[in-house]
Image (tube, rainbow, N blue to C red):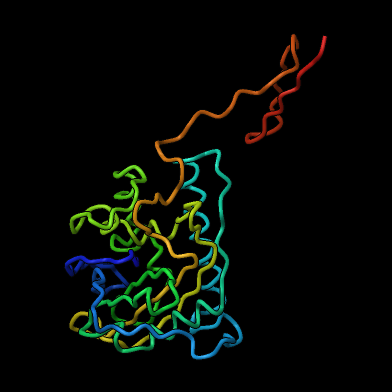
Amino acid sequence: MNAKPLATAAAMICGLIMVGPAAVAQVRAVPVPGADERAPVCPSATAPPGTGSQISTADAADIVRAHNEARREAVQKYSPGLSVVPVKWDPKLACDAQAWADDPASSQGGALHHSGRGQNGDEGENLFNAFPGPARPMMALDPSVNFSWIAEKSKFDADNNAPVNDKAAPGTNHHAWGHYSQMVWMSPTSPTTSIGCGVKQGVPVSTGTGWILVCRYLAAGNNDGQQAIPGGGGPVPPPKPSSLSGAAVTMAQQSDRQLTALAVDR
C-alpha cells in the first residue's frame, strides 16, 4: 500500500500457520514511510529478460491472475455495469520492485518500509514479508492468511468502497485496506493497468530472517478523494430484456449459465 502520503503508526500482526508437523510463525508489519528512505528503481531502462525480477514465470502468472480475479469480484459487487480493467505484468515495474526489495532500507529493522512516490516514478507499492523461507509470493494473495493483502477485502467492504481519505485516523479508511484497494484500483482518473513484483530472501523480519515481496503498480492507486471502484453504492439489478414494440418475449434456457431472450414481432 502506498497512499500519497501515508502516515500511520507501525503495528505488528502475527499469525501461526501449520506446515507439516511444525507451527511456523509469520509476521507482517504495517509499513511506515520515513523521511530518510530511498527509492531505487531498475538500474537500466531495459528490464532483464524473463519476468524482470527474481519472481518466477509461474508466480508472475499467478499474481496477475489473482489480481484480475479480485478486480472482477469488486466490479461485480460495486459497479456491475463497469467493464473490468485488467492488469498485465510489466518487467520494468518488476525490475523496479526488485531494486527496492534488494535495498536493505526496505527491510530495515525487520519492518517494512515503503519507497516514496516522489522518488520511484510515482509508482504504487504493496509490501509483504514473512519468515522463515523459502519465499512464497502467493501468500500475500491468499485469503486464508489473515494478514495478506486480499484478506483486507472484508474491511474494504465494511467501508463500502469508500473514497481514500488521507486525513483518516490510523487504522481506518485506506490504512486498514489500502493493499487491497491498490489491487483492485480502477478509478477512471488513474486506473492501475500494470504490475510487476520482486522478491528477496534472507532479509530481517521481526526478530528472525525471512523474505520480502515488493509489488509496484502503474498507474498508482490510493489517491486522496478517489474510490477504487467508480460508481460505488452496491450492486444494481441487471437491465430487463428489451423487446420490439407490441411483441411478446420468449425465454429459452440454453445452459446453466446462458439464457436467450427472443422478441417475436406480431
Q: Residue at x 35, y 51 (%)?
A: 225
The reply, left or right, for residue 48 in relation to residue 110 is right
The reply, left or right, for residue 15 in relation to residue 202 is left
User: At which x and y percent is residue 25?
Assistant: 23, 73
* Quadrant placement of the C terminus: top right
Numbered marks: total: 0
The reply, left or right, for residue 67 in relation to residue 126 is right
* Quadrant placement of the N terminus: bottom left
Above or below 147: residue 43: below
The reply to whether residue 23 is in sight is no
Q: Residue at x 26, y 57 (%)?
A: 176
Residue 259 picture quarter: top right
In this rendered view, identify the residue nearer to me: 265 or 34.
34
The reply to whether residue 54 is in sight is yes
In this rendered view, identify the residue nearer to me: 187 or 252.
187
Residue 58 picture quarter: bottom right
Q: Residue furthest right?
A: 266
User: At which x and y percent is residue 47?
Assistant: 57, 85
Q: Residue at x 30, y 45 (%)?
A: 159
User: At which x and y percent is residue 219?
Assistant: 49, 65
The reply, left or right, for residue 158 in relation to residue 63 is left
User: At which x and y percent is residue 233?
Assistant: 39, 36
Above or below 242: residue 37: below
In this rendered view, identify the residue nearer to me: 55 or 77.
77
Q: Residue at x 75, y 22 (%)?
A: 262
